[in-house]
Amino acid sequence: MAHTLPPLPYATNALEPHIDTMTMEIHHGRHHKAYVDNLNKALEAHANLAAKPLDQLLREISQVPDAVRQAVINNGGGHINHTMFWEIMGPGGGKPSGPLADDIAKTFGDFGQFQAQIKQAGLGRFGSGWAWLVFAGGKLQIVSTPNQDSPYMTNQAPILGVDVWEHAYYLKYQNKRADYLDAWWNVVNWKKVDERYAKAKAGTL
Ligand SMILES: [Fe+2]
Protein backbone atom coordinates (compact mmCIF):
# COMPACT_ATOMS: atom_id res chain seq x y z
CA MET A 1 0.00 0.00 0.00
CA ALA A 2 1.29 3.42 -0.88
CA HIS A 3 2.33 5.74 1.91
CA THR A 4 0.26 8.91 2.18
CA LEU A 5 0.81 12.44 3.47
CA PRO A 6 -1.12 12.79 6.73
CA PRO A 7 -3.14 16.00 7.06
CA LEU A 8 -1.85 18.51 9.60
CA PRO A 9 -3.79 18.07 12.86
CA TYR A 10 -4.30 21.88 13.02
CA ALA A 11 -4.42 24.86 10.67
CA THR A 12 -1.19 26.09 9.08
CA ASN A 13 -1.46 29.34 11.08
CA ALA A 14 -2.08 27.58 14.41
CA LEU A 15 1.55 27.80 15.57
CA GLU A 16 1.89 31.55 14.94
CA PRO A 17 3.82 33.55 15.94
CA HIS A 18 6.44 30.94 16.83
CA ILE A 19 6.24 29.08 13.51
CA ASP A 20 4.87 31.14 10.65
CA THR A 21 2.11 30.08 8.27
CA MET A 22 4.21 30.08 5.12
CA THR A 23 6.85 27.86 6.71
CA MET A 24 4.14 25.41 7.75
CA GLU A 25 2.59 25.40 4.26
CA ILE A 26 5.87 24.74 2.49
CA HIS A 27 7.24 22.38 5.13
CA HIS A 28 4.17 20.15 5.22
CA GLY A 29 2.76 20.60 1.72
CA ARG A 30 6.01 20.47 -0.25
CA HIS A 31 8.90 19.06 1.80
CA HIS A 32 6.97 16.34 3.61
CA LYS A 33 4.95 15.55 0.47
CA ALA A 34 8.18 15.08 -1.49
CA TYR A 35 9.44 12.55 1.08
CA VAL A 36 6.20 10.59 0.75
CA ASP A 37 6.24 10.71 -3.06
CA ASN A 38 9.90 9.71 -3.28
CA LEU A 39 9.45 6.90 -0.75
CA ASN A 40 6.61 5.47 -2.83
CA LYS A 41 8.74 5.77 -5.96
CA ALA A 42 11.62 3.94 -4.29
CA LEU A 43 9.33 1.12 -3.16
CA GLU A 44 7.42 0.82 -6.45
CA ALA A 45 9.20 -2.38 -7.47
CA HIS A 46 9.40 -3.74 -3.89
CA ALA A 47 5.88 -4.71 -2.85
CA ASN A 48 7.19 -6.70 0.13
CA LEU A 49 8.92 -3.59 1.53
CA ALA A 50 6.02 -1.29 0.70
CA ALA A 51 3.71 -3.53 2.73
CA LYS A 52 5.75 -3.20 5.94
CA PRO A 53 4.92 -0.57 8.55
CA LEU A 54 7.45 2.23 8.12
CA ASP A 55 8.95 1.96 11.60
CA GLN A 56 9.59 -1.73 10.98
CA LEU A 57 11.13 -1.03 7.58
CA LEU A 58 13.55 1.42 9.22
CA ARG A 59 14.37 -0.93 12.12
CA GLU A 60 15.20 -3.58 9.52
CA ILE A 61 17.04 -1.16 7.24
CA SER A 62 20.00 -3.55 6.85
CA GLN A 63 17.68 -5.97 5.03
CA VAL A 64 16.63 -3.37 2.45
CA PRO A 65 18.39 -3.94 -0.90
CA ASP A 66 21.42 -1.72 -1.61
CA ALA A 67 19.74 -0.15 -4.65
CA VAL A 68 16.99 1.50 -2.60
CA ARG A 69 18.43 1.57 0.94
CA GLN A 70 19.58 5.20 0.90
CA ALA A 71 16.30 6.33 -0.69
CA VAL A 72 14.41 4.57 2.11
CA ILE A 73 16.67 6.14 4.77
CA ASN A 74 16.19 9.63 3.31
CA ASN A 75 12.53 9.52 2.35
CA GLY A 76 11.19 6.91 4.77
CA GLY A 77 13.01 8.75 7.54
CA GLY A 78 11.73 12.06 6.22
CA HIS A 79 8.17 10.75 6.21
CA ILE A 80 8.16 9.21 9.68
CA ASN A 81 10.13 12.07 11.27
CA HIS A 82 7.75 14.72 9.96
CA THR A 83 4.65 12.69 10.81
CA MET A 84 5.87 12.69 14.41
CA PHE A 85 6.83 16.38 14.23
CA TRP A 86 3.30 17.52 13.28
CA GLU A 87 1.79 15.23 15.89
CA ILE A 88 3.85 16.53 18.82
CA MET A 89 3.21 20.19 18.03
CA GLY A 90 0.13 22.33 18.57
CA PRO A 91 -0.84 25.68 19.98
CA GLY A 92 -0.23 25.74 23.71
CA GLY A 93 3.16 24.71 24.97
CA GLY A 94 3.41 23.92 28.68
CA LYS A 95 5.28 21.06 30.27
CA PRO A 96 5.14 17.26 30.40
CA SER A 97 3.15 15.62 33.15
CA GLY A 98 2.93 12.25 34.85
CA PRO A 99 5.63 9.61 34.33
CA LEU A 100 7.41 11.57 31.58
CA ALA A 101 7.80 14.64 33.81
CA ASP A 102 9.17 12.44 36.62
CA ASP A 103 11.57 10.55 34.36
CA ILE A 104 12.85 13.72 32.67
CA ALA A 105 13.63 15.16 36.10
CA LYS A 106 15.31 11.91 37.19
CA THR A 107 17.36 11.60 34.01
CA PHE A 108 18.35 15.19 33.24
CA GLY A 109 18.11 16.97 36.61
CA ASP A 110 15.12 19.18 35.85
CA PHE A 111 13.02 20.38 32.94
CA GLY A 112 15.27 23.37 32.27
CA GLN A 113 18.36 21.18 31.98
CA PHE A 114 16.47 18.85 29.66
CA GLN A 115 15.54 21.81 27.44
CA ALA A 116 19.14 23.03 27.48
CA GLN A 117 20.42 19.62 26.36
CA ILE A 118 17.90 19.39 23.51
CA LYS A 119 18.95 22.87 22.41
CA GLN A 120 22.61 21.87 22.55
CA ALA A 121 21.90 18.75 20.48
CA GLY A 122 20.11 20.89 17.88
CA LEU A 123 22.80 23.57 17.77
CA GLY A 124 25.55 20.97 17.65
CA ARG A 125 24.12 19.26 14.58
CA PHE A 126 26.21 20.65 11.71
CA GLY A 127 24.09 21.13 8.60
CA SER A 128 20.71 19.44 8.53
CA GLY A 129 19.21 16.98 10.98
CA TRP A 130 17.22 16.50 14.14
CA ALA A 131 17.57 16.65 17.93
CA TRP A 132 15.70 13.90 19.75
CA LEU A 133 14.44 12.63 23.06
CA VAL A 134 14.43 8.86 22.58
CA PHE A 135 13.63 5.84 24.72
CA ALA A 136 16.29 3.18 24.29
CA GLY A 137 17.84 0.55 26.50
CA GLY A 138 15.11 1.17 29.07
CA LYS A 139 15.91 4.84 29.54
CA LEU A 140 15.47 8.34 28.15
CA GLN A 141 18.34 9.74 26.12
CA ILE A 142 19.00 12.87 24.07
CA VAL A 143 20.57 12.26 20.69
CA SER A 144 20.96 13.96 17.34
CA THR A 145 20.78 12.49 13.84
CA PRO A 146 22.00 13.88 10.50
CA ASN A 147 19.75 14.48 7.50
CA GLN A 148 16.54 12.43 7.83
CA ASP A 149 18.13 9.48 9.64
CA SER A 150 15.49 8.01 11.94
CA PRO A 151 16.22 6.88 15.51
CA TYR A 152 14.35 3.68 14.62
CA MET A 153 17.36 2.63 12.52
CA THR A 154 19.39 2.30 15.71
CA ASN A 155 16.53 0.79 17.69
CA GLN A 156 15.68 3.98 19.57
CA ALA A 157 12.04 5.00 19.96
CA PRO A 158 11.55 8.71 19.15
CA ILE A 159 9.49 10.36 21.90
CA LEU A 160 10.07 13.96 20.79
CA GLY A 161 12.12 15.45 17.97
CA VAL A 162 12.84 18.92 16.69
CA ASP A 163 13.65 19.50 13.04
CA VAL A 164 16.77 21.65 12.63
CA TRP A 165 16.82 21.70 8.83
CA GLU A 166 16.85 25.29 7.61
CA HIS A 167 13.52 24.62 5.87
CA ALA A 168 11.97 24.38 9.35
CA TYR A 169 12.90 27.92 10.41
CA TYR A 170 14.73 29.99 7.81
CA LEU A 171 11.84 32.21 6.60
CA LYS A 172 11.23 33.57 10.09
CA TYR A 173 14.51 33.03 11.93
CA GLN A 174 17.05 33.12 9.06
CA ASN A 175 20.37 31.87 10.47
CA LYS A 176 19.26 32.11 14.13
CA ARG A 177 18.72 28.43 14.87
CA ALA A 178 19.06 29.10 18.61
CA ASP A 179 16.10 31.51 18.59
CA TYR A 180 13.98 28.96 16.72
CA LEU A 181 14.92 26.26 19.23
CA ASP A 182 13.96 28.54 22.13
CA ALA A 183 10.62 29.46 20.54
CA TRP A 184 9.80 25.88 19.59
CA TRP A 185 8.97 24.95 23.19
CA ASN A 186 5.90 27.20 22.90
CA VAL A 187 4.35 24.83 20.37
CA VAL A 188 5.05 21.42 21.89
CA ASN A 189 1.89 19.38 22.54
CA TRP A 190 3.00 17.59 25.72
CA LYS A 191 -0.14 15.48 25.87
CA LYS A 192 0.97 13.77 22.65
CA VAL A 193 4.56 13.46 23.88
CA ASP A 194 3.31 11.89 27.11
CA GLU A 195 1.32 9.40 25.02
CA ARG A 196 4.34 8.55 22.90
CA TYR A 197 6.39 7.89 26.04
CA ALA A 198 3.74 5.54 27.41
CA LYS A 199 3.72 3.67 24.07
CA ALA A 200 7.52 3.50 23.95
CA LYS A 201 7.65 1.95 27.42
CA ALA A 202 4.99 -0.56 26.37
CA GLY A 203 7.03 -1.38 23.25
CA THR A 204 4.32 -0.17 20.88
CA LEU A 205 5.81 3.09 19.55
FE1 LIG B 1 11.58 19.22 7.92
Image (tube, helix red, strand yellow):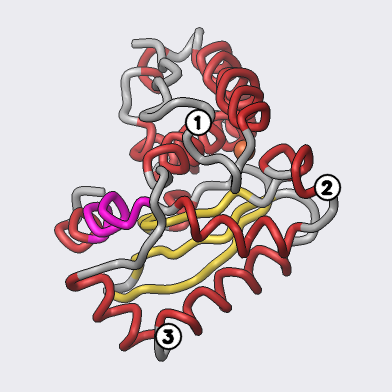
Disc number placed over residue 174 in the picture, else none = 2
Residue at the location (40% across, 35% down)? 57
* Residue 31 point in image, percent of width and height: 64, 25
| Circle nearer the N terminus (3, 2) | 3
Disc number placed over residue 8 in the picture, else none = none
Q: CA distance from mark 3 to mark 2?
A: 30 Å
Disc number placed over residue 79 in the picture, else none = 1
Residue 66 is at least partly visible in this image: no
Q: Which residue is mark 3?
A: 108
Q: Amino acid at mark 3?
A: Phe
Looking at the picture, tell me which residue is in the foreground, 73 or 101: 101
Question: How crowded is the residue under tag 1: few (<14 C-alpha within 10 Å), some, or many (20+)?
Answer: many
Q: Amino acid at mark 1?
A: His
| Circle nearer the N terminus (1, 2) | 1
Q: Which stretch appears magenta?
A: 189-197
* Residue 134 point in image, percent of width and height: 40, 63
Q: Amino acid at mark 2?
A: Gln
> Would you identify the image quadrant in which residue 71 lies?
top right
Within the magenta stretch, is there residue 196? Answer: yes
Residue at the location (25% across, 59% down)? 194
Respond yes or no on whether mark 3 lies under 8 Å from ligand 1. no
* Residue 177 point in image, percent of width and height: 74, 58
Tag in front: 1 or 2:
2
Q: How many marks?
A: 3
Q: Is residue 15 left or right of residue 167?
A: left
Element under label 3?
helix
* Residue 58 point in image, percent of width and height: 44, 40
Element under label 2?
loop
Q: Is residue 137 left or right of residue 76?
A: left
Q: CA distance from mark 1 to mark 2?
A: 24 Å
